[in-house]
Every structure is written in C-alpha cells, then in structure tokens.
Amino acid sequence: MANKKSDEQVKKIVNDYQSSWNYRDSSYHNEWENWYKLYNSERVAVGYNGISDTFVPMAFSTIETKVSATSGSKPQVEYFPTRPDQATNTEVLNGLFSFYWDLDNWTSKFIQHTRNLFLYGTGVMYVYWDIDQPRVKNIPLRDFFCDPTATILTYQDAAYMGYRFFANKADLEEEMVVNPDYDEMDPTSKELVPKFKNLDKLDENYDTGEESDKQEKDDFMGSTLDDNGQSGQIEVICYWTKDKVCYVGNKKEIIYEEENYYKTRQQFLGYPNPKGMYPFIVDSNYPDESLLYGRSELQPIFKAQELLNDITNQNIDAVSWSLDPVMELDPQYSDYIDKISNVTGAIYPFKPGSYQAVQKPLIPSSAFNERVNIKNEIRETTAVEQVIKGAAVSGDTTATEIKAQVASAGRRFDALLSALESGGYYTFAKLVFQMIQMYVNQPTMLRVLGETGVSWETYDPEQFQGDYEPRIKLQATLQNEKAKKMRDYKEMYTAMLGSPFVNQKNLTELIMKEAFELDGDKVQKLIVSDEELAQMGDKKEDDQNPKMLINYKDAPPDVKMQMEMDAGFEPSESHMEQYEADNLMRGADEAEALGRARSSMLGDVNGQNGAF
C-alpha cells in the first residue's frame, strides 16, 4: 500500500514537472537559446551568407550596459512599520539585512540575477535559511519549473514549483541531517541520519532525454562530459508545494520528503494560521499580467542586430573584392590557368585586356550610413543612448539634442529602476524579513560598518513584532537623487549669495550639511565662528599697510626699486636707466611747455603795443 502511494506521488510530481517543461519547450526554450546565442555573438537568422562572418556585438553591449547601470553595489533597504504600535526606529533591522548581504556576498549573485533578467526576460533565485543566516542561490531558468497556469502576479500562490539539478549519488549518500526521533537513552538511536533514501534503487546511467541548462551551454561551447564525468550522476527534481517538499530521483523514486520547512517553523512558533511559503523569487522584465515569464531586452532588436550583421558582412566582402578581385581570362589562354599565380610583377604572354579583374560596382556611401542608422535605432529602442554610454558625440549634434536624448533615456531608466526596486528586490527583502522573524528568536549581534570603523550592535527580535514593509533604493536611484539635490541647492546658493536678507553663514552651513552631506562636527571645523570673523576683521584693518595698495606694474621706477629691495631682491639696473630717461623726458616736456608759454606771452605784449 505504501509503495502504491509512493508510486502515485512520483507519478504526480513527474507529470507536473513534464507539464511545465512542455509548456516552456513549445516556445520559450527556443527563444532563450536564441538570446543566449546573440549575447555570445552567434548568428541566429542569417540573411546574407557570404565569405565574411562578422558579428557586431550590440546585443552583448546592450545587456552589459544595463547590468552595470543597475547592479554591482549594495542597495539601500529600509523597513517601515505597518501599524502605529510598532517600533519606528528600524536602523538595527536595516543593519541586520545589510549584515546578511555582506555575509553571503549577495552583490555578485544579484549581478548574475540581473543579467539573466535582461538576457532571458526572467530571473529566478532560491532563498533558504542556513543555520544562522539566509543564503541565496541563482537557479538556471531552463531548470526552473512552475505551475503553467501561474502568472507573475500569482506565482506565490501557484499549485507547485521547483527546480531540477544533477548530483553525484555518492555525495547524496554522505549527506546527513539531525534525527528528529533521536533518543539519548536508546543506544541504537543515532543523532545524525542520512538525509536521502532509496538511492540504491536509482540507476547512475539514467538518460533524462531533456537537456539541463548546463548541458545546453556545454553543447554550445563544444564541450561535453565523457563517460567518466557522467559516472554517478543522477537527476533530482526538487518539488515544492505550500505543504510539502519532495525530491524525486531519476523520475522513479522519492528520495526525500518533508513538510514545507516554513510551515513547520510557523507551527513550532505558534502562528495562529500557519501557511507554508515558497522560497523562490521570480523576477520578470517587462511583465505581462497574464504571463509568468517576461521579455528579453534582445527581443525587440534581434532582427535589427542580424540585419546589421548582414550589411556589415556585405561591406567587408565588397571591400575584399576591391582589394583582391576575381580575375577573368580570355578563353584562348585557358592552357595557362594552372600556371597563373597571384604574384607581384608576374609577366604573362597575353594580349592587353585578356587577363583583367572582373568589374564590380562601387560601394555606395549610403551603405555605411545605413549601418550607423541601424545602430542608432538599436540604441533608441533599448534606451542605451550613445551619450549615456559615454561614446563620442558627432560634431553636428547640438546641446539641445543631447539634453533631449539624456532626458528621454533618463525617464526610461527611472522607470526601469522603479520596476526593479518594486519587483524582485522588494520580494527578496520581504522574504528575508519573514525568515528573520521565523529563525532569529534570540538577541543577535550584528556588525555595522560606519565612518569610524567597525562596531557591533544587538538585534532584539522582541522589538520588531508584526509585519514591516521594505523600501528599496538602488545605488543608481540614490545617485540620481543626490545629483538632483545638489543641483537644487546649487541654484539656491547662487540665488541667495550676497543677499542682505539671508544669513550667509547659515546658508553656507546648510549647503555643507544637505548638499555635501557633512556631519555637524565637520561643518563646525570648516565654518569660521563669529568671534574669529570679528578678530579677522579687526586684524585686517590694523595690519593694512598703505604700501600694499600700490600696484607694482603701475609704480614709477624708483618705487619699483624700493619694492624690490623690500622683497629681498637686488633692484634691476634698468629701473635707474628708466628713471633717468623719465627725468630727461620730463625736463624736455617742461622746457617745451615754458617755450610755448614764453611765445604766448610775447605775442600778447606785441599785440598790446600795436594797439597804441
């Protein structure tokens, strides 16, 4: 009876797995394979099959540009209470999440998750509790399965989900778990027992007939496991419902079966309505409310990508024809064909024009322009603009056009960040908090990295009862907010600078604290106090020397000599020469002025004498 029940259970699990596989195999598998090929510069739809086989890696550039812009650093995660009677200061809870992030190096795992999300349109992660901390595992999309009727909005309530993996049979036999029925008084009772059962009934040379994600990628790279590498490998289907967790080996035997871990934990903690939960995070790119799987970033551009490859190969072949053309020979010299070689300076006894290059039309200039247009269309479609990527801007691009491109790409980029923050990152932060509530039941020490170095704080689970809502901000969002904040404060500072109605000292302190995010102590070290400012003003008035007001450039030569002597320099002889020349010039000017005055006076006297 037990064997019959087990057989029925295995049959149901295998049928559910096969139903999900068939649903994805009908269309999704082929698409995922195409996106992987394009990302790795492999042709998918060849329109022009010539000599050259060049691939312009716009697909790779698009994916990696978006990955680098949205991941690669720790996000800011803050939890907020959902009821007025909950603790509002959640800095310790936020710090605990950050501490767990560093322990398991979630940054690298989210980079891979984001790459899968943009490349395939869907990314899957598996979160589990390991002794005293949560851990994350990236699940290959091809090996993940879920109820085909589920959507991105309802997958947490799906009838089943799970993933397939391959494991070494000997390793599974050595894996042990704590015996829940262990009795210290019974000498035959063991504290640790094997985790898996029925392994002896499994054939190590089992052929699944369905390639795993690793097998498919190995085939693409031209690498396959030999018989020795495949020896001892068995297929395991990890099957989850909200009530149970089952592992099926080689689609034949139940090798592991337990109640849903989280439902068991909820019952142990006395939850009023214990419900199991799925530890899977399914993240969808450009989600559709009727579907579970999203759209790849390459889906709208793959035809343009292949058209670009075709035109590029045509151009290269045309240039090759021009540099090394095909030759034609007069039939009367056909006996010489075997003797003709492509050697510089070769001489053949042919009539002029008997041996010449086949004429080909010139390459139109529009061919190059068409390649540029296709690249621009790809950038525009994916919002990976030339300016955003840091590429050079053409000389005829105006500042207004650049601003419009940046603004348009910026709005789409903001929407992308918002979708990521409210999608997989939100679900992940929510799931981690639920695990913290279930498994962290005692005060726990956590490491905090601050400006002063490493410090340790205590997380008390009694302070954070009930549900808390996470808010996530990626580093790109924080940088955008900081840049906008800096612009706003810069405009305010420019408008208020020197205004008699605004306290300039307080304005400077505000800019330092808010725009540059300096703490109060650092600001006070930089700001001059009122007493110091007054002393500086008095000292400036007392120490002001009238000599310092003289401009060296405009000073006469004798004064320049004195200024150089005061500064410790030996006065230049040119100053004395200039001084003597100036004196002679002044003497001449004075003599000329006296002569004009004398002439004027004599003229006046003669005029008066004539009048009498």
Image: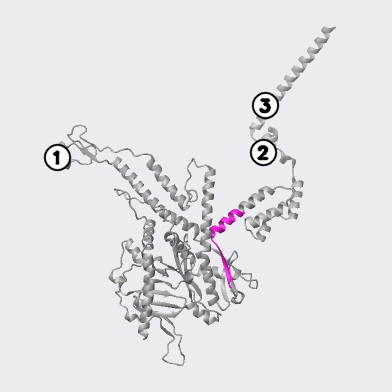
Circle 3 Cα neighbour tier, 10 Å, few/some/many (<14 / 14–19 / ≥20): few
Q: Please name the amino acid that badge 3 sits on.
A: Ala
Look at the picture and state if 305 lies above or below 573. Answer: below
Q: Secondary structure at mark 1?
A: helix
Look at the picture and state if 3 lies above or below 391. Answer: below
Q: Please name the amino acid that badge 2 sits on.
A: Glu
* Horizontal arrangement in the rendering, residue 152 relative to residue 55 (left or right): right
Tell me residue 336's x, y (percent): 16, 39
Marks 2/1 in contact by CB < 8 Å: the verdict is no
Q: Which residue is mark 1?
A: 335
Tell me residue 234's x, y (percent): 34, 74
Residue 455 in view (yes/no): no
Q: Secondary structure at mark 2?
A: helix
Give the number of the mark in front: 3 or 1. 1
Marks 3/1 in contact by CB < 8 Å: the verdict is no
Q: Please name the amino acid that badge 1 sits on.
A: Asp
Look at the picture and state if 554 lies above or below 611. Answer: below
Circle 1 Cα neighbour tier, 10 Å, few/some/many (<14 / 14–19 / ≥20): few
Q: Which residue is mark 3?
A: 581
Tell me residue 392's x, y (percent): 47, 46
Residue 409 in view (yes/no): yes
Front residue of 223 and 235? 235
Give the number of the mark in front: 2 or 1. 1
Q: Which residue is mark 2?
A: 564
Magenta residues span 467-485
Tell me residue 354's x, y (percent): 20, 34
For the C terminus, the image quarter is top right
Q: Whole-Å distance between the Cαs marked 2 and 1?
A: 97 Å
Quadrant of residue 530 in the image? bottom right
